[in-house]
Amino acid sequence: MTAAVHSLTVRHRRTVALDGIDLRFGTGVHGLLGPNGAGKTSLIRVLATVAAPATGRVELLGGDIAEHRERAAVRRRLGYLPQEFGYYPGFTVREFVSYVAWLKEMRPADVPEAVERAVERVGLADRIDVKVKRLSGGMVRRVGIAQAIVNDPELLLLDEPTAGLDPEQRVEFRALLRDIGAASTVIVSTHLVEDVAAACAEVTLLESGRVAFRGTTTDLMDLGKPDTGPEATPGPGASAAAVTDSGDNPIERGYTAALRAHRAKAAAPSGAAR
């Protein structure tokens, strides 16, 4: 198992962002879904070792990151693209990705080839010597993806990676995820459920800091079918049509059904039949 969290709780002052969740991630592409404030970014930040949990345990790449030495070792083996990443606008693409490779303590002899390969994989080979400040927003996002994959990470964490990408670039990005996920663990936090349907084998849906659904993309789509039973219904008295009208495609309908089922359980009186 590449990554695991046990009874993980994360707080932001008085707000509980994650409430005692347990998750395990192995090789493959994993989608992380949920509405705003569900806890997706909080989870990604903890897995990236840039935020500490209030309680619970985090295991990454075979180590317990509570130890400083383990955290430093893990950081060299993972890739991370935050929702908003910082960069030096005066650097060229080559210079910036090379700088990140240096931060990850890659062997100097390996860096030039690794940088060119990462930049080529995100479709910016013809911009490699252009300053980042001269790139469009979508291109800057692709630079962010390049710096995240320059070290061929065993664990790749991406927070809203397709923001600013056009439809063609998103299709190419999904193919890249599938390629990386063949040998590594990729966790993608996104609002775009169609990206999850196209690229991810497994989905985790968070709601108010708790796990509302965990399963394959097929499992999630099945929840949106009108004949999947009471767990998929939006609420008491709702019709099958209400389920099928809650999205433009199967995975959107499944996403809505899963959220509604989770909220109905959370709202049920204590001791009520579940």
Image: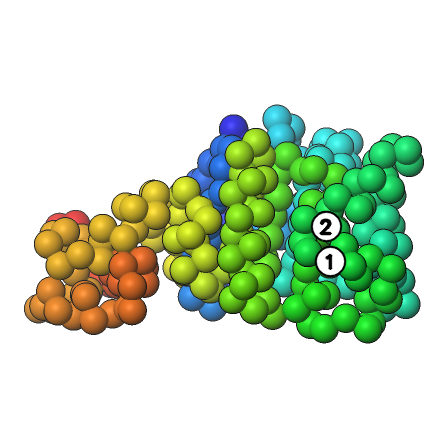
Residue 54 shows in the view: no
Q: CA distance from mark 1 to mark 2?
A: 6 Å
Determine the residue located farthest toward the top in the rendered image: 62
The image shows residue 112 at horizontal and vertical percentages of: 87, 42
Q: Amino acid at mark 2?
A: Glu
Judge left or right: residue 71 versus residue 131.
Answer: left
Q: Quadrant of residue 156?
A: top right
Q: Residues within 10 Å of mark 2 (few under 14, many from 20)?
A: some
> Depth check: 110 or 267 in front?
110
Judge left or right: residue 79 versus residue 231.
Answer: right
- The residue at the point 47 percent across, 45 percent down is 30
* Disc 1, SS: loop
Discs 1, 2 touching: Cβ within 8 Å: yes
Tag 2 residue: 120
Compared to residue 211, the image places residue 249 above or below, namely below
Q: Amino acid at mark 1?
A: Leu
> Depth check: 262 or 196 in front?
196
* Disc 2, SS: helix
Tag 1 residue: 124
Judge left or right: residue 25 versus residue 152.
Answer: left
- The residue at the point 25 percent across, 70 percent down is 246
